[in-house]
Image (spheres, rainbow, N blue to C red):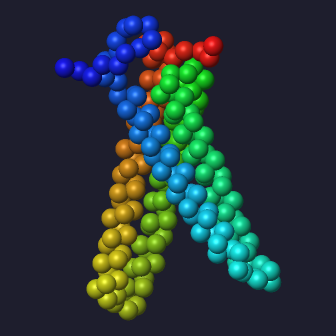
Amino acid sequence: MPLMARVESGRRDGFTLWRILVWLMLLLAAYGCLQYLLHAQQVWRTLQPLPASNTGDILELHKMLAWDVVYFIASFALVVICAGAILRQSWARVSLQAASVLLAVGWGLVGGVLLFAHWREFSQEVAMTDAQTSLDTASQMALAHMHRAFLMALAIKAACVPVLLWLAWWLGQPQVRAQFRKLR
């Protein structure tokens, strides 16, 4: 028996994948908010005891703090957009379409290409270091773990790009558009 959801108009909508994707995006964005907030707190605590004469470190920490704030705001905005989509507000449908495309292109494609470029550069430097002096077993294991983490991150980004683009396309379909209501 398929899962059913009751709608205000009395009709029943069956199981829909787009709603699950929106819930998943909401949870991941909320987790991102938490991570950026905790990192910003750590940076702030590190920044406080530094003497004013240490301008280089202070400048770098301020940059990190600024990026944490920007990422926190973006993650929080995505939480609000996803919550609006779950509540089927019409403004959220268009916003979620735009956010899905931005995430697919910015986070998925551009981020994946940059990650791959960094990995190639890093692996070449490791190969040069290993050629000069052989790495110990612990270092080799750490590098193998890092290699797997990079590959997993690339795979996740590659898998999310078509899913996010599909979500943006599906939110524009008439049968989905009809499920959203304007504010009263």
Left or right: residue 58 versus residue 81 is: right
When the figure is inspected, residue 139 is found, relative to residue 162, above or below; the finding is below
At horizontal 31% and vertical 22% (from top left) the residue drawn is 15
Q: Residue furthest top?
A: 10
Q: Quadrant of residue 84?
A: top right
- Quadrant (top left/top right/bottom left/bottom right) for the C terminus: top right
Q: Quadrant of residue 23?
A: top left
- Identify which residue is drawn at 27% across, 22% down: 3
Location of the N terminus by quadrant is top left
Figure label count: 0
Residue drawn at point x = 57 percent, y = 36 percent: 80
Q: Determine which quarter of the picture holds residue 133.
A: bottom left
Q: State the image coordinates of residue 156 (x, y, percent, origin top left).
A: 38, 50
* Residue 151 relative to residue 45: left or right: left
Instruction: List x then y, in percent, for residue 105.
Output: 53, 42
**119 or 138, nearer to the observer:** 138
Residue at image x 57%, y 27%? 92
Q: Position of residue 25 (x, y in %)?
A: 45, 40
Residue 2, image x, y percentages: 23, 21
